[in-house]
């Protein structure tokens, strides 16, 4: 009986504390909590005293994000169970596809299954991502659970298959398929027709769109009001995450600006209040030189690519073909990139590697490559455009067909070794 009372007490305690912590009122919560139970609470004074001591140790507010994520996790699990139960009642021989490895419940489906594993950055960069706390740790565990229970996996590169899933997580290679990306292009937003000089009209339009996008600057960046968009800049389109290597790029840029007198600004597309980025910009007085734009539309993204002198991608890890290279080249802008395994799978020509890639762990090498690319912009683009034209022969329809072929194989011949 006593244990039952304690269980009820615990539920009431959690409910009261969740509500009153939301209003930042620990003392009021404790006062009402003591009075609400009358004789029952006095009868179990020792338990109440322990609870009070726990409250005293929790003077700071409860981590509301953790409470919300806990509630969401419970609802998500319940909904997944319902969905899986509905699927399993169908007794269908079709194959099921999951576009992500965040859902371990997907493995409860009693039918042929194919799970996509785009990348494993949480596993490859555990220490930097650990700073994001408990939600990231939980996501990492869910991903590992999903992968370990997966019947068939598909990913976008040999590096993720062999370097991560097989070597680091010990997944059986016979159940991993590889389907490469098609190029991601943005020219549909930048090309226009019907003018005597379509190229000039396109540039004028995209400068106007890019100028409007500057109003989305966040963080410590500052850009005075401009009537036209005519300044030169470098462009890195990416969210701010540990694997994206933004700080190394900022070090390279600060050197180019202050020591090499490169007068370009640097435009990033991440959220400017990201702590390490905000701190670096402030400490190095780059507020007028580095702009962080967030919430861009695809048309604004395309316009910024179009107007940039050079696109830069220093990323340390990608799941498949880095989209930066094809997005930039599709609108006429050359690009330099970090020399990582995934990129080497796509950029196989030695001469193209030499002109395009740099050591992403060496800010000086990055700076040297950026400076060289700016000085040889036209020649670099001409070389890279030939490479792009070959890549562009592969379309997203090809990607879809290959996925459907895999689903057909695992639906008709379970356990067949992946081969395309």
Image (tube, rainbow, N blue to C red):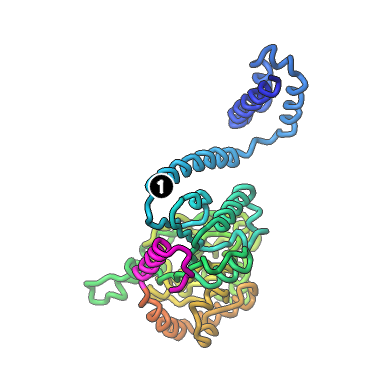
Quick check: is 276 in the magenta stretch? no
Picture layout, residue 381 above or below residue 266: below
Secondary structure under tag 1 reads helix
The residue located at (46%, 50%) in the rendering is: 109
User: Which residue is most to the top?
Assistant: 39
Residue 210 showing in the rendered view: no
Residue 112 in sight: yes
Image quarter of the C terminus: bottom left
* Residue visible at 70% across and 17% down in the picture: 41
- Quarter of image, res 23: top right
Residue 282: image location, x then y, percent? 62, 58
Q: Is residue 124 left or right of residue 189?
A: right
Q: Position of residue 348 (x, y in %)?
A: 50, 82
Which residue appears at 56% of the width and 55% of the height? 143
| Above/below status of 337 relative to 279 | below
* Residue that lies at the very extreme toward the bottom in this rendered image: 351
Q: Which span of residues is magenta-colored?
A: 395-420
Residue drawn at 38 percent across, 74 percent down:
330
Observer-nearest residue: 259 or 94? 94
State yes or no: residue 409 in magenta. yes
Q: Which residue is disc 1 drawn over?
A: 87
Is the stretch drawn in magenta largely helix, strand or loop? Answer: helix
- The quarter in which the N terminus is drawn is top right
Judge from the rendering whether residue 330 lies leftward or rightward of residue 245; answer left or right.
Answer: left
Q: Nearer the viewer, residue 4 or 374?
A: 4
Q: For this view, does 143 lie left or right of residue 328?
A: right
């Amino acid at each position: 009986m006593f244990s039952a009372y304690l269980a009820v007490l615990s539920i009431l305690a959690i409910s009261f504390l969740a509500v009153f912590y939301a209003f930042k009122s620990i003392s009021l919560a404790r006062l009402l909590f003591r009075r609400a139970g009358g004789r029952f609470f006095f009868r179990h004074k020792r338990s109440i005293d322990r609870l009070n001591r726990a409250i005293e140790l929790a003077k700071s507010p409860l981590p509301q994000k953790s409470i919300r994520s806990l509630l969401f996790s419970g609802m998500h699990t319940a909904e997944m169970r319902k969905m899986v139960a509905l699927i399993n009642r169908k007794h269908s021989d079709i194959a099921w596809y999951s576009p992500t490895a965040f859902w371990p419940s997907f493995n409860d489906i009693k039918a042929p299954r194919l799970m996509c594993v785009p990348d494993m950055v949480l596993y490859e960069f555990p220490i930097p991502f650990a700073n994001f706390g408990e939600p990231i740790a939980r996501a990492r565990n869910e991903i590992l659970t999903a992968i370990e229970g997966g019947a068939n996996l598909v990913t976008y590169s040999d590096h993720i298959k062999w370097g991560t899933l097989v070597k680091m997580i010990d997944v059986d290679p016979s159940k991993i398929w590889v389907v490469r990306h098609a190029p991601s292009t943005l020219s549909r937003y930048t090309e226009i027709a019907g003018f005597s000089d379509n190229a000039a009209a396109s540039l004028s339009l995209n400068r106007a769109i890019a100028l409007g996008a500057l109003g989305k600057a966040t963080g410590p960046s500052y850009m005075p009001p401009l009537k036209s968009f005519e300044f030169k800049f470098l462009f890195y389109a990416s969210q701010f995450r540990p694997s994206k290597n933004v700080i190394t790029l900022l070090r390279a840029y600060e050197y180019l600006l202050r020591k090499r007198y490169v007068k370009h600004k640097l435009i990033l597309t991440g959220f400017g209040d990201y702590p390490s980025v905000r701190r670096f910009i402030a400490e190095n007085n780059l507020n007028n030189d580095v702009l962080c734009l967030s919430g861009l539309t695809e048309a604004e993204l395309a316009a910024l690519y179009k107007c940039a002198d050079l696109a830069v991608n220093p990323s340390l890890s990608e799941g498949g073909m880095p989209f930066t290279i094809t997005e930039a080249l599709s609108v006429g802008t050359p690009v330099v990139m970090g020399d990582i395994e995934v990129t080497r799978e796509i950029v196989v020509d030695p001469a193209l590697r030499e002109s395009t890639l740099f050591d992403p762990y060496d800010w000086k090498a990055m700076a040297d490559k950026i400076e060289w690319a700016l000085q040889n912009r036209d020649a670099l683009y001409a070389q890279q455009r030939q490479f792009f034209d070959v890549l562009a022969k592969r379309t997203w329809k090809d990607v879809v067909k290959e996925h459907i072929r895999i689903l057909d194989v695992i639906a008709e011949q379970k356990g067949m070794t992946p081969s395309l």
